[in-house]
Image (tube, grey):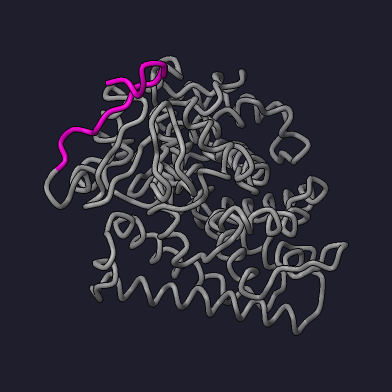
Amino acid sequence: MTATMTSPFTFAEAKGALPVLGHVGKLLRDPRGFLMSLPDQGDLVRIRLGTSRAYLVCNAELTHQVLVNDRVFDKGGPFVDRLREFIGESVSTCPRGEHRRQRRLMQPAFHPNRLTHYAELMKTETVVVTNSWQHGQVLDVYAAMQAITTKIAARTMFAAPASAALIEDAYDALNEIMTGAGKRMLIPPPLDKLPTRSKIRYDRARKRIREITDQLISDYRAAGVDHQDLMSMLLARDEDGGALSEEEISNQVVTLFLGGVETVASTLGWALCVLALHPEIQDRLHAEVDAIGPSPTLEDLAKMPYAKGIISESLRMYPPGWLLTRMTTKDSMLGGVHIPAGSTVIYSPFLLGNRSDLFDDPDRFDPDRHAKRPVKGSFVPFGEGPRKCIGDTFTMVEAPLVLALIAAKWRVEPAGTRIRPLERMSLLLTPRDLKVRLVARDDF
């Protein structure tokens, strides 16, 4: 049915809801199938998560409206609630009223003039890891990319030598959190408080990640040294004397570590799988990198549009944050539909990126398609509007640079690789249990 007589958008109640569970069972059993079935039902589809209802946006224009209007569509809903459990109210999860101040205080850490320094650290840590690889070795792509992104996160965020021993512990805790958070997203209160074994492990990891970040902050405070890293920038005061509180600094550290390790590792992991399965794409990447030399730098990224296109295409087809939520702050209209205050509104970068009316032949991995600007609201792995990811530029330096450094030395081949994203419910869309075989290019 149509939303209103004058609206160009359609509205529907999602089919197949079960008593009590609603559509939770479908999301758990076949998240991809359920999600991709919704656009045929409407541009805005109301689904049931247990006894509560949520509005899932299937249309790019409506998604754009949601993302640019954070006054009405504020951060909130099940996805953000799960993130707040272990991140707290950081720049990525805090309400609109807090966001502008936090973002202003964090922005210096991501100033373009710092990217050259960060890029050199990215390059150094990538070379250390990739030089340890062996010809013929089979890599678990996600674990291998986590090994690189964890080292990069450690060097760019925590340059102080005293912090190095805590990084591996933080990484283990973060993995435990990410394993449990996806399914918890669909568990309604008060059931999410039940002391199950997974809940106990989840809470233990949440506590540990906080202990680690608090220790890092304490060590930095005691040393009083500017290490020219992200932590030093977070501890600094701005020109007006403003500063983040201790709790806010801890929240930002967890947020940046999550974004810098998990999401970049996911994107690179998917990209490696695609290269293994599509030799013609890998050949073009090698040709582009070879024209630059074996050790590409930040300045060389401008001459590597294909490498950047591979990363953008990975983000289109396999966005780490595949299902995201907002919460309405007041009664509003969206697509001609009345949305009550306090409603959950869901948008999906995965759904939008895989729609055939937004991207020609969406199942085809085509790095060249990113040479032209996409339709507003169709390509949103970093979001849009005032809450766009603060680390988007950092990521779009790190991911293609790491990919180019790998391609300069290695070729990848399939090793039982089978790309079937969203086979199970998770907080992030990650390439788990996917492998490639390394071939040294000198021997190829």
Q: Is residue 207 magenta?
A: no
Picture layout, residue 344 above or below residue 223: above
Q: Which residue is drawn at 36% across and 60% down?
A: 181
| Place of residue 56 in the rendered image (x, y in percent of width and height, measured from the top left) | 36, 37
Tell me the quadrant of the picture where the N terminus can be found.
top left
In-front residue for pair 282/355: 355
Q: Report which quarter residue 26 is drawn in.
A: top left
Q: Which residue is drawn at 48% across and 46% down?
A: 330
Asked whether, in this view, residue 25 is left or right of residue 138, the answer is: left
Secondary structure mainly formed by the magenta segment: loop
Q: Residue at x 62, y 38 (%)?
A: 385
In-front residue for pair 309/276: 309
Picture layout, residue 242 above or below residue 371: below
Q: Which residue is drawn at 33% across and 38% down?
A: 421
| Place of residue 66 in the rendered image (x, y in percent of width and height, measured from the top left) | 51, 36
Segment colored magenta:
1-17
Residue 221 in view? yes
In-front residue for pair 85/263: 85
Residue 436 in view? no
